[in-house]
C-alpha cells in the first residue's frame, strides 16, 4: 500500500460539501447512524480508556444506529435503535468540530474535521503516539483487505490527482475487531435504555451535552471484551474523568465551534491554529517537507 496524503486528509475531514456526489457509504447498511458525522473513527475499549486517563475524554463522542422494525432493537425517544440483548449498541469515536481547512487545493472553508487534525498542515497531531487509533493506523489497508472503496479513491474521483498509489493491503486487520469479537471491545451495549430518554433526541439534533457524551464513554471504559457486562465502578470513574476533562482539544472544539460559519462556508480570516490549538498544548506537526508522502504524519513527543 502506498498513499499520497499531502494536501488531502480526506479520511479526517467531512468534505462532503466539496463533493458533487457526496458519499453515503456509512449509511447504506441496515443501521443508519443517528449522528451526521462522516468517516467516524470507532475506538477500542482500551483506546477509550487511554484517552480518558490522559485527560482527553472531552474529545470522545458516541454513535448509535437507527434500524428498521424487523431488526433487533429497542425504542427510545421514538427511534428504534440497534441493540444487543436489549441494550442500545454504540461506538465511541472522535469528535469533529468545524475547522478552517483547505483540502485538495481548495479555498479555506469551515468543514467538520477531526479534533486531532492540524488544520494548517492537514497532518495528524497524534500520529505515532500511543493514542493513535488502530482504525487510523490501518487505514486504508483494511478497506483494501475487504475489497471496499477507500476514501483515497473517492477523493481521486471528485478532485483528481493520485492518492492511492499502490493497493496491496499492509499488515493484518485483526486489531479492527470486526464481528462478534467486537462486543465489549469496540461495540458496546448501553445497560439501561431508559437512561437515554432525551439523549437520543439530542443526538439526532446534534446537541449532545458533555454529560450525555460522558455517560457513553464511561460505559465503554467499564466494558469487558467478549461480553455486555459493565464494571460500574470503572464506568463511574471514567464518566467523572470525562466531565473533569479540560484538554487543549476540548477547548479548541469550543473555540472553533464559536468561530465557525456554516458547513462548507468560506472561512474569511479565521483564528489561527497556533492560537486555538498549539498555544493550548496541541502537539505540533512537522509539515510535509519533513515527511514526504504517506499517511497524515504528526508528532506527539509526550507519548511516543
Ligand atoms: S489515507 Fe487516503 S484519504 Fe486519507 S489522507 Fe491519505 S490519501 Fe487522503
Ligand atoms: S486521529 Fe488523526 S488520522 Fe485519525 S481521523 Fe483524527 S486526524 Fe485523522
Image (cartoon, rainbow, N blue to C red):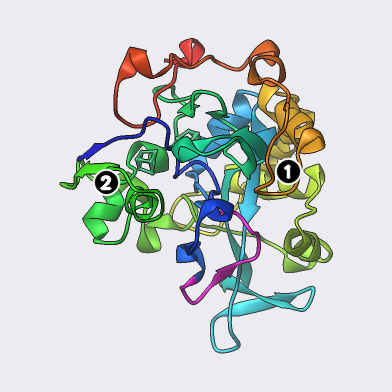
Q: Is residue 304 left or right of 20 when viewed as pictured?
A: left
Determine if the magenta segment contains residue 37: yes
Q: Residue furthest bottom?
A: 70
Q: Main secondary structure of the magenta part?
A: loop
Query: Residue 285, how many percent across, how many down?
Result: 48, 17
Between 106 and 112, the residue placed more toward the observer is: 106
- Residue at label 1? 214
- Residue 2 image position (x, y, % from top left): 21, 37
Q: Quadrant of residue 191?
A: bottom right
Is residue 29 shown above or below 162? below
Residue topped by disc 2: 141
Specify whether residue 234 is in view.
no
Residue 77, given in percent of the width and then of the height, sits at 79, 73
Quadrant of the frame with the C terminus = top left
Q: Please state if 242 lies on the left or on the right of 118 as rendered.
A: right
**Which residue is more in the foreground, 267 or 128?**
267
Residue at point 55% right, 15% down? 283
Whether label 2 touches label 1, CB < 8 Å: no
Viewer-proximal residue among 73 and 59: 59
Q: Quadrant of residue 70?
A: bottom right
Q: Secondary structure at mark 1?
A: helix
Mark 2 element type = helix
Classify 10 Å Cα crowding around label 2: few (below 14), some (14-19), many (20 and above).
many
Give me the C-alpha separation between circle 2 and circle 1: 31 Å
Magenta segment, which residues?
A: 28-38
Q: Residue at x 42, y 37 (%)?
A: 8
**What is the total number of numbered labels drawn onto the structure image?**
2
* Quarter in which the N terminus is drawn: top left
**Can you give x and y, in whole percent of width and height, for residue 102 in the image?**
54, 35
Amino acid at each position: 500500500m502506498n498513499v499520497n496524503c499531502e494536501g488531502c486528509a480526506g479520511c479526517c475531514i467531512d468534505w462532503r460539501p466539496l463533493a458533487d456526489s457526496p458519499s453515503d457509504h456509512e449509511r447504506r447498511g441496515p443501521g443508519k447512524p443517528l449522528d451526521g458525522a462522516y468517516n467516524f473513527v470507532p475506538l477500542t475499549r482500551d483506546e477509550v480508556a487511554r484517552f480518558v486517563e490522559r485527560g482527553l475524554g472531552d474529545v470522545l463522542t458516541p454513535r448509535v444506529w437507527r434500524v428498521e422494525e424487523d431488526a433487533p432493537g429497542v425504542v427510545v425517544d421514538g427511534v428504534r435503535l440497534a441493540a444487543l440483548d436489549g441494550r442500545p449498541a454504540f461506538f465511541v469515536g472522535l469528535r469533529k468540530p468545524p475547522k478552517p481547512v483547505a483540502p485538495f487545493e481548495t479555498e479555506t472553508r469551515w468543514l467538520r474535521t477531526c479534533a486531532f487534525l492540524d488544520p494548517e498542515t492537514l497532518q495528524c497531531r497524534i500520529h505515532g503516539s500511543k493514542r493513535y487509533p488502530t482504525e487510523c493506523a490501518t487505514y486504508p489497508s483494511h478497506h483494501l483487505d475487504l475489497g471496499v472503496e477507500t476514501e483515497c479513491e473517492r477523493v481521486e474521483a471528485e478532485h483528481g490527482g493520485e492518492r492511492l498509489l499502490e493497493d496491496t493491503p499492509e499488515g493484518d486487520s485483526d486489531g479492527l475487531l470486526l464481528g462478534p469479537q467486537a462486543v465489549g471491545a469496540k461495540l458496546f451495549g448501553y445497560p439501561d435504555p431508559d437512561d437515554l430518554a432525551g439523549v437520543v433526541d439530542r443526538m439526532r439534533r446534534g446537541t449532545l451535552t458533555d454529560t450525555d457524551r460522558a455517560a457513553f464513554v464511561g460505559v465503554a471504559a467499564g466494558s469487558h471484551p467478549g461480553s455486555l457486562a459493565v464494571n460500574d465502578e470503572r464506568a463511574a470513574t471514567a464518566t467523572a474523568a470525562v466531565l473533569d476533562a479540560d484538554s487543549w482539544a476540548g477547548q479548541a472544539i469550543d473555540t472553533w465551534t464559536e468561530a465557525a460559519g456554516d458547513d462548507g462556508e468560506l472561512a474569511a480570516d479565521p483564528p489561527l491554529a497556533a492560537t486555538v490549538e498549539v498555544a493550548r498544548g496541541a502537539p505540533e506537526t512537522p509539515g510535509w517537507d519533513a515527511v514526504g508522502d504517506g499517511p497524515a504524519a504528526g508528532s506527539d513527543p509526550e507519548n511516543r
